[in-house]
Image (cartoon, rainbow, N blue to C red):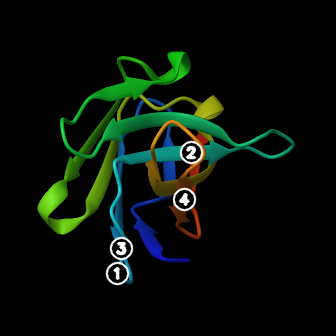
Amino acid sequence: AQLEESGGGLVQAGGSLRLSCSAARRVFTINGMGWYRQAPGKQRELVASISFGEGIQNYADPVKGRFTISRDSAKNTLYLQMDNLVPEDTAVYYCSFWYSDNGALRYDYWGQGTQVTVSS
């Protein structure tokens, strides 16, 4: 994995966690960053994304108003502040950096994943 995540763990419902992600090795030009999650028996889903330059954010409906994505472009570091967590947020969370020209060219970098468990 070229990215390293940290900050996962076990938290009670209603609690908060902050995930961080940074490049372990040099990455090429990117224009997007995001957090995905995969719960047992489910497909990986995009939770939140942010454009590298302008900082435009997008969120999946289940996390809107509870999660906040941010980045430090100078440090190639990505964050996910998760508040008011619910058991349905339990999953392995992966960070990803990518470059896409909205055509045929796209490449991605991934982290190894960090477990987030929310108890009821």
Rounded to the nearest whole Å, what is the CA distance between mark 4 and mark 1?
A: 14 Å
- Mark 3 belongs to which amino acid? Ala
Q: 82 above or below 76?
A: above
Q: Quadrant of the N terminus?
A: bottom right
**Viewer-nearest of discs 4 and 2:** 4
Q: Which residue is mark 4?
A: 107
Q: Which residue is mark 1?
A: 26
- Mark 2 belongs to which amino acid? Tyr
Residue 33 image offset from top left, x and y in percent: 39, 48
**Viewer-nearest of discs 4 and 1:** 4
Q: Quadrant of the C terminus?
A: top right
**SS at mark 2?**
strand
**SS at mark 4?**
strand
- Mark 4 belongs to which amino acid? Tyr
Q: 60 above or below 49?
A: above
Q: Mark 1: few, some, or many residues within 10 Å (few <14, many ≥20)?
A: few
Q: In the image, is 67 to the left or to the right of 115?
A: left
**SS at mark 3?**
strand
Rounded to the nearest whole Å, what is the CA distance between mark 4 and mark 2?
A: 16 Å
**SS at mark 1?**
loop
Q: 27 above or below 13?
A: below
Residue farthest toward the bottom in the current orientation of the protein: 25
- Mark 1 belongs to which amino acid? Arg
Q: Are marks 1 and 3 in contact (CB under 8 Å)?
A: yes
Q: Are marks 1 and 2 in contact (CB under 8 Å)?
A: no
Q: Which residue is mark 3?
A: 23
First in residue order: circle 4 vs circle 3: 3
Rounded to the nearest whole Å, what is the CA distance between mark 1 and mark 3?
A: 7 Å
